[in-house]
């Protein structure tokens, strides 16, 4: 991994999923590791983007607790990228003008593949252009993380998941998903390993 060709994709790093939130999937240790990865991205000037969950009334999945209402898509404190955020919702008529001055997020969350909608696909393609390595972390392993991992693998990118900075709603299903990732070549590693590799390359 090299800072100039590595993208950090955070998934649902939102208040609703953190301790004390509406659906607290992320425990305190995982939350600290997520915050450490945000700090590392700022330190090294890494590109960032990802996925957020934002449901209009009645759109939330019926099989999970109420979470991520449309007005609560803001990042958890300590989980803001250094660049201004642009949140792109599915079903827009066209993607916004895309540049390297903003951190782009697609508001697909647990409800849909991150690149299933044409506008969101344009955003994901923009984020992944010119990237060799992608580091993914956040919530939840078996839904939103699995979707963005799949999008990266289909584009033949070297895909890494910081497993100590990733949370699950269903632990048994998450282990199945992680096993499938390994079979597809995903690199499961720790936050400390990500930091060591990137700092070594930067120096």
Image (tube, helix red, strand yellow):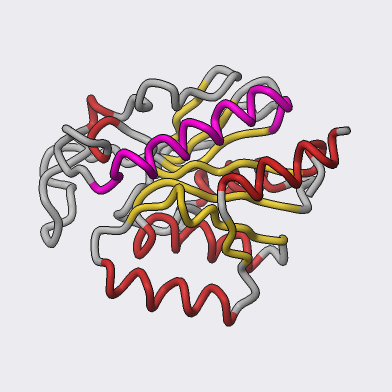
In this view of the protein, can residue 135 be seen by the observer? Answer: yes
Q: Is residue 158 left or right of residue 36?
A: right
Q: Is residue 89 left or right of residue 162?
A: left
Q: Residue 116: give x, y in percent of width and height.
A: 46, 58
Q: Nearer the viewer, residue 87 or 190?
A: 190
What residue occupies the far bottom of the structure in this picture? Answer: 183
Is residue 186 one of those drawn in magenta? no
Q: Is residue 47 above or below residue 145?
A: above
Q: Nearer the viewer, residue 101 or 45?
A: 45
Q: Residue 146: give x, y in percent of width and height.
A: 44, 63
Q: Residue at x 31, y 58 (%)?
A: 168
Q: Residue 33: give x, y in percent of width and height.
A: 47, 39
Q: Is residue 185 left or right of residue 33?
A: right
Type of secondary structure dominating the magenta stretch: helix
Q: Is residue 109 left or right of residue 187?
A: left
* Residue range highlighted in magenta: 25-46
Q: Residue at x 54, y 24 (%)?
A: 81
In this view of the protein, can residue 91 be seen by the observer? Answer: no
What residue occupies the far right of the structure in this picture? Answer: 203
Q: Residue at x 49, y 48 (%)?
A: 137
Q: Residue 149: give x, y in percent of width and height.
A: 54, 61
């Amino acid at each position: 991994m090299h800072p100039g060709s590595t993208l950090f994709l955070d998934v649902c790093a939102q208040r609703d999923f953190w301790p004390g939130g509406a659906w607290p999937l992320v425990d305190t240790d995982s939350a600290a590791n997520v915050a450490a990865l945000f700090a590392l991205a700022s330190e090294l000037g890494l590109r960032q983007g990802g996925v957020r969950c934002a449901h209009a009334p009645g759109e939330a999945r019926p099989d999970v607790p109420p979470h991520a209402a449309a007005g609560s898509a803001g990042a958890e404190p300590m989980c803001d990228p250094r660049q201004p955020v642009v949140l792109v919702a599915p079903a827009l008529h066209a993607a916004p003008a895309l540049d390297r001055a903003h951190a782009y997020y697609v508001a697909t969350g647990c409800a849909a593949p991150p690149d299933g909608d044409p506008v969101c696909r344009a955003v994901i393609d923009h984020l992944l252009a010119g990237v060799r390595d992608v580091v993914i972390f956040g919530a939840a392993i078996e839904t939103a993380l699995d979707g963005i991992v799949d999008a990266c693998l289909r584009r033949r990118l070297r895909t890494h998941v910081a497993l100590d900075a990733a949370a699950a709603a269903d632990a048994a299903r998450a282990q199945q998903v992680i096993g499938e990732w390994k079979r597809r070549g995903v690199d499961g590693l720790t936050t400390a390993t990500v930091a060591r590799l990137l700092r070594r390359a930067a120096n």
